[in-house]
Image (cartoon, helix red, strand yellow):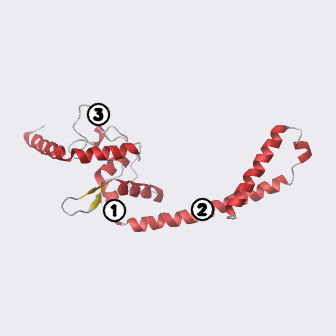
Amino acid sequence: MDDKQKELLKKQVDKLKEKDAVEDSLKLDAKSIGIDITMPSGEITQGLIDAVPETNLSSTPIFTENRRGKYRIDEQHFALMFLEVFQEEDRATGDVNPRFSAVSRMLGIERKTLSFWWGKKEELQAQQSALMTQGFKYVSTSLMVEMIRMLQALSKVNYEKMTEDSRDMKNFISLINTMMNKLILFSDR
């Protein structure tokens, strides 16, 4: 490491001393949702993002493979959720902004991509909302079709023979119970 890099590293360490409380807060926030973003012992503090290669981070990003911009809407929504949770206040302006670099390390998604998604957050959330609405309609339709098939199969059951084996009767009662509960649920009663 040359003198210029050492000096840059020293300046970054000095800056980190001022930001220790903020970084500790970020670590606690991440740990509260099951993510460890601390450095291995003996390494430079976690905040030296630019000076320390990401491979030195002790945690594995959630999205490990490189997708080259191919993310599903649920993955984009998941990243937006992290960006909303991990934010910091700009002391100069008072604005609250996402911690793009920290979230990038946690998720394994490029900072540029996260910033782009944050810029079109409303559009992505509208897509997610539409997907949820249409998805529930699809799932309820599929369940209803299966319930009809199950009811048709029940018409072929010999109930008298079923009473001979208590396990068959127990399974039958459980099936009827489940079907009735789903019917009540889908008819909003």
Indicate whether 156 appears above or below 184. above
* Residue 73, placed above or below residue 175: below
Q: Nearer the viewer, residue 50 or 133?
A: 133
Residue 145 seen in the current view: yes
Residue at horizontal 83%, vertical 43%?
169
Q: Disc 1 and disc 2: Cα gap in Å?
A: 29 Å
Residue at the (35%, 47%) spot, across then down? 29
Q: Nearer the viewer, residue 177 or 148?
A: 177
Residue 118 x, y percent position in the rendering: 35, 62
Determine the image quadrant of residue 85. bottom left
Q: Amino acid at mark 2?
A: Phe
Earlier-in-chain disc, 3 versus 2: 3
Expressed as whole percent of the image width and height from the top left, the position of residue 3 reads 7, 40
Residue denoted by label 1:
116
Q: Which mark is residue 40?
A: 3
Q: Amino acid at mark 1?
A: Phe
Q: Position of residue 65 (x, y in %)?
A: 40, 46
Vertical relation: 20 (above or below) 96: above
Dot 1 lies on which element? helix
Q: Which residue is mark 2?
A: 136
Label 1 vs 2, first from the N-terminus: 1
Residue lying furthest front: 189
- Helix, strand or loop at disc 3? loop
Residue type for callout 3: Pro
User: Relative to 126, does residue 10 appear above or below in the rendering?
Assistant: above
Within 10 Å of the Cα at label 2, are there few (<14), some (14-19), or many (20+) other Cα atoms? few
Where is residue 55 shown, x and y percent of the image? 30, 39
Q: Which quadrant does the C terminus fall into?
A: bottom right
Q: Nearer the viewer, mark 3 or mark 1?
A: 3
Q: Is residue 108 left or right of residue 17?
A: right
**Quick one: which residue is furthest to the top in this view?**
42
Residue at the location (68% across, 62% down)?
186
